[in-house]
Amino acid sequence: MAPKAMTFKANSVIYFKGDISDKIYILKSGKVSMNSEDIETGQEVRDLIQTGEFFGVKSALGKYPREESAVVLSDAEVIQFTVPEFEQFVAQNTRVIMKMLKVFSNQLRRIHARVSSLLVTEEKTDPESGLFGIGQYYLNKKMYAQALYVFRRYLTYYPSGKFAREAANNIAIAEQYAQKYGQGKGPEIGSAAPLPEKHSVGPTPAATRAELSDVAKVYYNGVSLFGQNKFQEALEEFKKVAEQKEDEEYSAKALFEIGRCLFQLKQYDGAIRQFSGLIQKYPKLPDLPEALYYIGQCYEQKGEADRALGFYKKIIAMTTEADPVQRKVKKALRALEEKSK
Amino acid sequence: MNLNLAAFERFAVRFQKGDIIFVEYEPGDSFYLIQSGRVQISKIMGNIEKTLDILYPGEIFGEMAILEEAPRSANAIALDNVKALEFNRANFEILMRGNPAIALKLLKLFTKRIYDQRRRFMILTLDDIQARVMDVFLMLAETDTGGQQEGEKREFKTTIDDIAHWAGLPTEKCREIINHFMNQRRIEVLPDRIIVKNLNEFARFVNSRRKNLAT
């Protein structure tokens, strides 16, 4: 079978609205009008087909009822394709498909706009609030990995957006809960979730909910940058926080974050100095095992497996099995053993 | 389908099982062709994450990004380890020229999207909200590709939340209407499905409420 040339007399109809058919046509000569009713107003709409234009494509490809009647206004020559013939034809004429894609995408955009204009009952959510809301959903469902993804994306798109502070705070919560309790576990997170006690060097819930101090703003900007993998910029922010004297809570936290930045920037000697200095300054640091873990990791990266091993063993001795740091250390130990085999 | 994709290896991206590929409201500037693994398309509605579709290798998602950098309309999550080709408007034409099969697939996808949106629009233009709810069932019957169900009584694997979404009604309002239908014994609501006793009767009612559309 091949595409078939056909002629139609004026006032005849090539197909009727509502027909189901797998035929696609191209107009060679004459005048053909597409008659349909506007789906909103019911008013009749007439569109003339241009010479060389395909018609009946969507309904044939999708096996849907024709949305319009194809009425011949003056004697017309058309070529009729079955769907397989059409597919074969356009496969050799990608330009034709591209053109149709553009037409269809336009139609789709228009119908989309019309649908959304009718959806008055559905709350219109602006993308910024919508994105943040999805993060909140995942955080409430204890899906920390997903929540982290969304909040980090939020901060990438809206670094100084209206929820930037909350997003940064939620990143901290999600990271800590993921580590402490694991994916899918942990206490309920209310709308004003307090940070876990263990991380008392961090900002207290009251501090995060009230208007943030300037120091806190810089700190959270650093957290936000870190979340976007902009470690160098994050480092600069944390350094500012660490140098200030008015709020020691934040400066202690920032010293830790500086270490993490240096580690990410592969400045292992600097990171080791940073964490060692922190431990000396705050021997009772709640994050001590975590800091030691980073030091171990740094040595490992430097190829000094023996020294890393020493730190890992120390952590095992000072933590319990329930401690997520211990799980991480055990994993690191296993990896080291594998390597030495 | 004869796909010549070896040349597109440089567009390959990989996701681990469970990874988010994108979420609703993110700005979208790329679309994906799945090469291996499955992708779940979902949307967060109220307090549940609803699966809209599960896509398999050879399928395309995120295609609305070709049109404009509109925000994503749903979440895409890797259900397995997924390998996909990632395209944007810049390299889209190159892909299409070398691969009419993909272009054709995209064309069909748009066809379906336009049809679905038009159908949805038809529901929303009904002023009578009872007719709207009924029309949602008619739409679901039309798109039910199983096709084994015939006759007046039909079963739908759907929920009141779903119906409310399609009808563009608040869930509570929709529940009210459905309860009303239940009292009239026109409908039965079970935990996993809804049974419509006489779909033809729904069709007649909806047609009588469609304004201006003279037969």
Image (cartoon, rainbow, N blue to C red):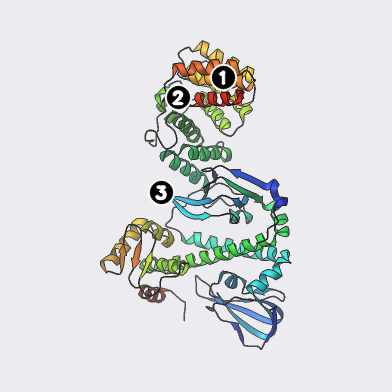
Q: Secondary structure at mark 2?
A: loop
Look at label 1 and name its amino acid.
Answer: Gly
Q: Residues within 10 Å of mark 3 (few under 14, many from 20)?
A: few
Q: Residues within 10 Å of mark 1 (few under 14, many from 20)?
A: many
Q: Chain of mark 1?
A: A
Q: What is the distance, in whole Å, between disc 3 and disc 1 at their CAs?
A: 42 Å
Q: Which residue is mark 3?
A: B48
* Image: A203 above or below A108: above
Q: Earlier in the sequence, mark 2 or mark 1?
A: 2
Q: Residues within 10 Å of mark 2 (few under 14, many from 20)?
A: some
Q: Which residue is mark 1?
A: A296
Q: Secondary structure at mark 1?
A: helix
Return the residue found at the far front: A341
Q: Chain of mark 3?
A: B
The percent position of residue B32, horizontal first and vertical second, equals: 61, 51
- B125 or B116, which is in the foreground? B116
**In-image side of A320 versus A260 (left or right):** left
**Residue B108 visible to the viewer:** yes
Return the residue found at the far left: B183
Q: Are marks 2 and 1 on the same chain?
A: yes
* Image: A291 above or below B61: above
* Image: A283 above or below A28: above
Q: Which residue is mark 2?
A: A203
The percent position of residue A216, horizontal first and vertical second, equals: 50, 25
Q: Chain of mark 2?
A: A
Look at label 3 and name its amino acid.
Answer: Ile
Q: What is the distance, in whole Å, between disc 2 and disc 1 at their CAs?
A: 27 Å
Look at label 2 and name its amino acid.
Answer: Pro
